[in-house]
Amino acid sequence: MKKSGDDSFDSVSCSGPDAAFVVLDRAGSGHLHQSCVDVAGTEYDYYDSGDGGEGAICVGTKGADTAHAVNSAQKGDCLTDTNGSNVQKVDCNNSRAIDRVLDRRDTTSFMPDAACSSVAGTQSTYSYVLKAKKGIGAMGTGVVFCLIPKGSDATRTVDNAKVGDCLKKLSADDLEVTDCASPDADYKILNSLPDKSFCDRVSGTIATYSYQRPGTIALPAVLCLGAAR
């Protein structure tokens, strides 16, 4: 296929010089996939009825590596640097793997990362929203990946912590839950409050830490921290 203006495609010979895109599959009722976002490598979807039957036509770049297409990633898979221009699904042992997928959620172009707000351990998100074609039924649907650095333990992130738990420093700006009897315990959580100024009234507070799970619109939570021992 080739682009026809901004809003459509024309069918051309796949061996032609202007064949920049390819039909990967159809999706919908009666097809293997209900949505084109589940067809590896899909960039565009639009709706049509023709010889292939009714449903969404899933279009991707001709010659693209669909085996590593980011929209094929599932829970437990890893992704390359999501700040890059060509994010891919890779084996978690691959040196290019940066983040591990904690969950994969359906989303849209409106607040795409909000679906990860309930996924404990999420440290960042990456959304993949299909490019919608005007006037032909596509809705800008996609998926959002709830991510954590590939070597991290999702049960030990700060959003899992509660009052009385202990934390250790991972870096100047990052903490992780640890056993209070562990020699690496740096802080104990004394309270959780809506503003760090309130921690001034909590006896024993030596530091504060605020965090906000990606995708949430609520104010950040503030932990009042005391010495671990």
Image (cartoon, grey):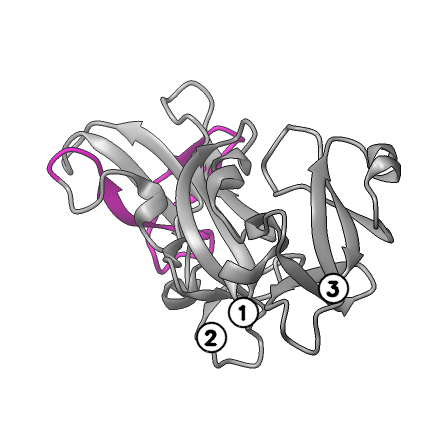
Front disc: 3 or 1: 3
Residue 130: assigned label: none
Q: Residue at x 47, y 75 (%)?
A: 92
User: Which one is earlier in the sequence, the residue at label 2 or at label 3?
Assistant: 2
Q: Quadrant of residue 72?
A: bottom left
Image check: 24 left or right of 135? Answer: left
Secondary structure, mark 2, is: loop
Report the residue marked by disc 1: 150
How packed mark 1 is, by other alpha carbons closer than 10 Å (few <14, some 14-19, many 20 or more), is: some
How packed mark 2 is, by other alpha carbons closer than 10 Å (few <14, some 14-19, many 20 or more), is: some
Image check: 53 left or right of 92? Answer: left
| CB within 8 Å, label 1 to label 2 | yes
Secondary structure, mark 1, is: loop
Q: Nearer the viewer, residue 109 or 166?
A: 166
Question: For the residues marked 3 and 1, what is the alpha-carbon distance in whole angstroms?
Answer: 28 Å
Report the residue marked by disc 2: 92
Report the residue marked by disc 3: 228
Looking at the rendered structure, the kind of residue marked 2 is: Cys
Front disc: 1 or 2: 1
